[in-house]
Amino acid sequence: MLPSGNRMRRRDDFTLAVRRGRRAGRPNVVAHLLPPDEGAEAVPPLVGFIVSRTVGNAVVRNSVRRRLRHLVRRQLDRLPAGSLLVVRANPAAGKARPDELAADLESALDRLLRPASKGRR
């Protein structure tokens, strides 16, 4: 389970991360990462999840959300303090094997945590 201090709860945080953050898409997940503002080193990174009805019924959605929370928990130390991360499950995530979901999440985070190149935004 994700520690309570790292859970994103406010709608404004979700909106901010999705609209202003960098995005990395994979077949099963899309991750949005908004780096911290200046002086946010004391605040832990916040993580939120979006799992819509297109993923499956309530049982499938909750299962996908639990798996994603477990996978992100292992990656928390890689996230900069004060950053906002939103992980959105694609419809394929409902039928994805756990190792596929883990690989897609790790790949998306690797891409987001790489330094931004000057030519692309």
Image (cartoon, rainbow, N blue to C red):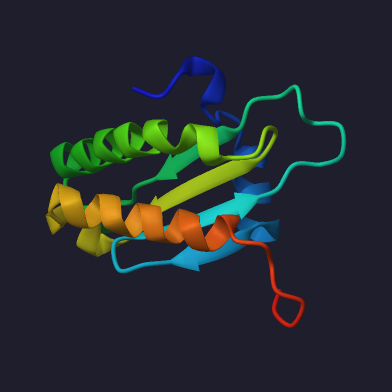
Which image quadrant for residue 27? bottom left
Q: Quadrant of the C terminus?
A: bottom right
Residue 65 in picture, x, y percent from top left: 30, 38
Residue extending farthest right: 38
Residue extending farthest top: 4
Q: Is residue 31 left or right of residue 89?
A: right
Residue at the image point whose x is 31% and y is 32% from the top: 70
| Above or below, comparing residue 15 to residue 104 in the picture | above
Residue at the image point whose x is 54% and y is 25% from the top: 6
Which is more toward the observer, 118 or 86?
Answer: 118
Q: Is residue 15 left or right of residue 36?
A: left
| Above or below, comparing residue 11 to residue 35 in the picture | above
Which is more toward the observer, 103 or 5?
Answer: 103
Residue at the image point whose x is 40% and y is 24% from the top: 2
Residue 111 in picture, x, y percent from top left: 51, 63
Which image quadrant for residue 107? bottom left
Q: Is residue 56 in sight in this rendering?
A: no
Residue at the image point whose x is 36% and y is 53% from the top: 105
Residue 3 in picture, x, y percent from top left: 45, 18
Q: Is residue 1 in sight in this rendering?
A: yes
| Above or below, comparing residue 12 to residue 22 in the picture | above
Q: Quadrant of the N terminus?
A: top left
Q: Is residue 55 left or right of residue 26?
A: left
| Above or below, comparing residue 86 to residue 90 in the picture | above
- State the count of labels: 0
